[in-house]
Image (cartoon, helix red, strand yellow):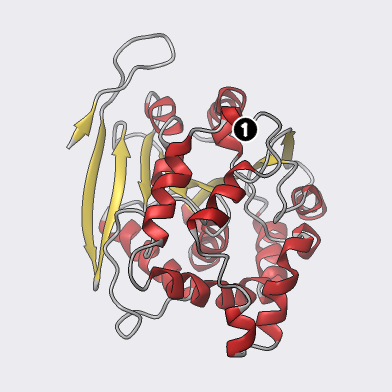
């Protein structure tokens, strides 16, 4: 299936293709656009989202780049196995996405990460730093000072992974919670399309998905434990980095974006008056910044 899109000047741009790839026992759904001979941009979404969050960004980037945007296992249209057949950990998500990049012959790529996509992306960079040409983070964290107070009950679950503490988070993987995440920190809530949080609410309601999300929430502690390793990667390799941050995000605070300046002094850090899903409300401002950054740093 393809969708025709219009470029910024009104001309018909490269179509967006909707594809699947078998990666071990996972049927990965991904969106692809642009000329495959051009530099690749890998887009990695977070919770609670899918490649759908990049629907406006993909055609804008496809004018100049090759764009790949997969749905992570347990998200979007990716067909994921049961927990008995697939360990839902961030390490495993990264292995699956890395194998996807190999199967798609993505030898080098810039990556844009959001939320859960960040620790997946950081692992890709650690595994093959020579493949990552640049990084864009939209509220994708790598520093402890970026963790907001909303993490308190989750951190309690990390330290004491009891059934009681797991049950205390039963409201997290629900349609109501997802809608709150999309709207929190947004001054004009009518600027947020209901499509994103409605689609993700349907996804989270599928049998077994809420438990998978609680498993991933528990394993998020492994990402925090690796923050020093990720930070060493930033210091050692100095990848060109752009942070486009919703400053009212209740989960990932502005301090987490500013912390990059310690490790990458030339990092470009920009804040927007919105919440966790900055592209939903400020895409018109953010997308040109992303294009300018890539045009400057990607050959």
Instruction: Using the image as rendered, state which of residue 273 and residue 99 is in the foreground.
Output: 273
Q: In this view, does 151 lie above or below 168?
A: above
Residue 220, horizontal then vertical, whole percent: 59, 72
Q: Which residue is drawn at 42% across and 9% down?
A: 9
Q: Indicate left or right for 214 with 74 as reference.
A: right
Residue 299, horizontal then vertical, whole percent: 48, 33
Residue 12, horizontal then vertical, whole percent: 29, 15
Q: Indicate left or right for 244 with 264 as reference.
A: left
Mark 1 residue crowding within 10 angstroms, few (<14) / some (14–19) / many (20+): some
Q: Indicate left or right for 77 with 291 as reference.
A: left
Q: How many labels does the image show?
A: 1
Q: Residue at x 72, y 58 (%)?
A: 235
Q: Which residue is drawn at 57% across and 61% down?
A: 122
Residue 83 in view of the camera: yes
The quarter of the picture where residue 148 lies is: bottom right
Mark 1, residue position: 189
Residue 159, horizontal then vertical, whole percent: 71, 85
Tell me the quarter of the image containing the N terminus: top left
Instruction: Using the image as rendered, state which of residue 238 and residue 163 is in the foreground.
Output: 163
Residue 296 in view of the camera: no
Instruction: Using the image as rendered, state which of residue 37 and residue 160 is in the foreground.
Output: 160
Q: Indicate left or right for 166 with 4 as reference.
A: right
Q: Is residue 19 above or below residue 269?
A: below
The quarter of the picture where residue 184 lies is: top right
Q: Is residue 65 above or below residue 222?
A: above
Secondary structure at badge 1 equals helix
């Amino acid at each position: 299936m393809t969708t025709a899109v219009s470029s910024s000047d009104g001309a018909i741009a490269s179509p967006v293709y909707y594809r699947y790839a078998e990666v071990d026992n996972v049927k990965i759904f991904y969106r692809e656009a642009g000329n495959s001979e051009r530099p690749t941009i890998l887009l990695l979404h977070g919770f609670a989202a899918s490649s759908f969050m990049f629907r406006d960004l993909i055609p804008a980037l496809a004018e100049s780049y090759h764009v790949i945007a997969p749905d992570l296992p347990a998200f979007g249209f990716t067909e994921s196995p049961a927990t008995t057949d697939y360990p839902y950990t961030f390490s495993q998500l990264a292995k699956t996405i890395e194998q996807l990049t190999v199967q798609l012959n993505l030898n080098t790529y810039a990556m844009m990460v959001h939320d859960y996509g960040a620790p997946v992306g950081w692992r890709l960079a650690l595994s093959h730093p020579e493949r990552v040409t640049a990084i864009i983070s939209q509220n994708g964290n790598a520093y402890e000072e970026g963790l907001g107070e909303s993490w308190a009950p989750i951190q309690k679950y990390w330290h004491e992974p009891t059934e009681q503490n797991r049950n205390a988070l039963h409201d997290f993987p629900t349609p109501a919670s997802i809608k709150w995440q999309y709207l929190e920190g947004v001054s004009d809530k009518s600027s947020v399309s209901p499509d994103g949080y409605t689609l993700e609410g349907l996804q989270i309601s599928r049998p077994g998905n809420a438990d998978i999300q609680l498993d991933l929430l528990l394993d998020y502690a492994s990402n925090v434990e690796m923050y020093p390793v990720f930070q060493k990667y930033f210091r050692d390799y100095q990848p060109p980095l752009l942070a486009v941050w919703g400053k009212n995000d209740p989960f990932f605070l502005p301090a987490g974006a500013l912390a990059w300046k310690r490790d990458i002094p030339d990092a470009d850090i920009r804040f927007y008056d919105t919440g966790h899903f900055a592209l939903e409300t400020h895409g018109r401002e953010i997308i040109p910044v992303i294009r300018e950054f890539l045009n400057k740093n990607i050959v």
